[in-house]
Image: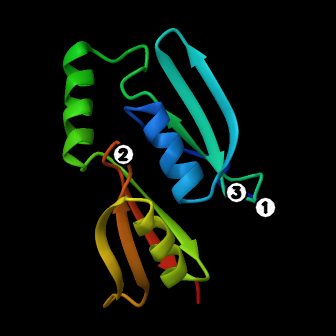
């Protein structure tokens, strides 16, 4: 049996800013862009990996969520502590330079970590932490 990660979901609070970050700064392909009323779901993924995607979704749209819960989710996103994703690249320095040049919010420049990886980190336009590891 083979199990893979097909999609992971990250909230976005500004679809155009999210698209600019994930498509233009990170170099992801846009796989789907679906709107409904004032909401928009954008599916992106790394080129050459059609089976792996991130779905950038409007936060707090689950049918069972209360207004108080929706407000809490938006507050956590705004603080940058709601969720994160970790990516990997074979050229951390080059990737970092490209993303920094895009104007992205740099959280951490490339550094060797005590737990055995070299990585860097950014915040996307919604405040999600995007950590990037160097592939060995």
Residue 28 placement: quadrant: bottom right
Query: In the depicted view, which residue is nearer to us: 66 or 91?
Result: 91
Work out whether residue 9 can be spotted: no
Instruction: Mark 2: give few (<14), some (14-19) or many (20+) Cα within 10 Å.
Output: many
Q: Is residue 89 above or below residue 1?
A: below
Q: CA distance from mark 2 to mark 1?
A: 25 Å
* Residue at left offset 38%, top offset 29%: 59
**Residue positioned 46% across, 13% down in the render:** 38
Quarter where residue 89 is shown: bottom right
Q: CA distance from mark 2 to mark 3?
A: 27 Å
Q: Say which residue label 2 marks.
A: 125
Residue indicated by mark 3: 4
Q: What secondary structure is marked by label 3?
A: loop
Seen as rendered, the residue at the extreme top is 37
- Residue 131 percent location from the top left of the image: 41, 67
Q: Considering depth in this image, is 130 or 69 the residue closer to the camera?
A: 130
| 15 left or right of 68 in image | right
Q: Which is nearer the N-term, disc 2 or disc 3?
A: 3
In this rendering, would 129 be left or right of 10?
left
Q: Residue at x 48, y 77 (%)?
A: 133
Q: Please tell me whether mark 2 or mark 1 is closer to you in this view.
A: 2
- The local secondary structure at tag 2 comes to loop
Residue 10: x, y in percent? 45, 42
Lower position in the chain sequence, tag 2 or tag 1: 1
* Residue shown at the point (43%, 27%) measured from the top left: 58
Residue 71 vs residue 37: left or right? left
The residues tagged by marks 3 and 1 sit, at their Cα atoms, a distance apart of 15 Å
Q: Which residue is mark 1?
A: 48
């Amino acid at each position: 049996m083979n199990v893979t990660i097909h999609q992971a979901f990250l909230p976005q609070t500004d679809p155009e800013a999210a698209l600019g970050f994930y498509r233009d700064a990170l170099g992801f392909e846009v796989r789907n862009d679906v709107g409904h009323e004032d909401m928009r779901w954008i599916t992106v993924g790394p080129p050459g990996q059609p089976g792996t995607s991130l779905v950038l979704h409007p936060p707090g749209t689950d049918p069972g969520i209360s207004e108080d819960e929706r407000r809490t989710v938006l507050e956590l996103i705004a603080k940058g502590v709601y969720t994160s994703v970790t990516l990997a690249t074979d050229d951390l320095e080059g990737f970092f330079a490209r993303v920094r040049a895009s104007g992205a919010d740099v959280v951490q420049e490339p550094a060797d970590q005590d737990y055995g990886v070299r990585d860097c980190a950014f915040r996307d336009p919604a405040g999600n932490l995007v950590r990037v590891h160097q592939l060995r």
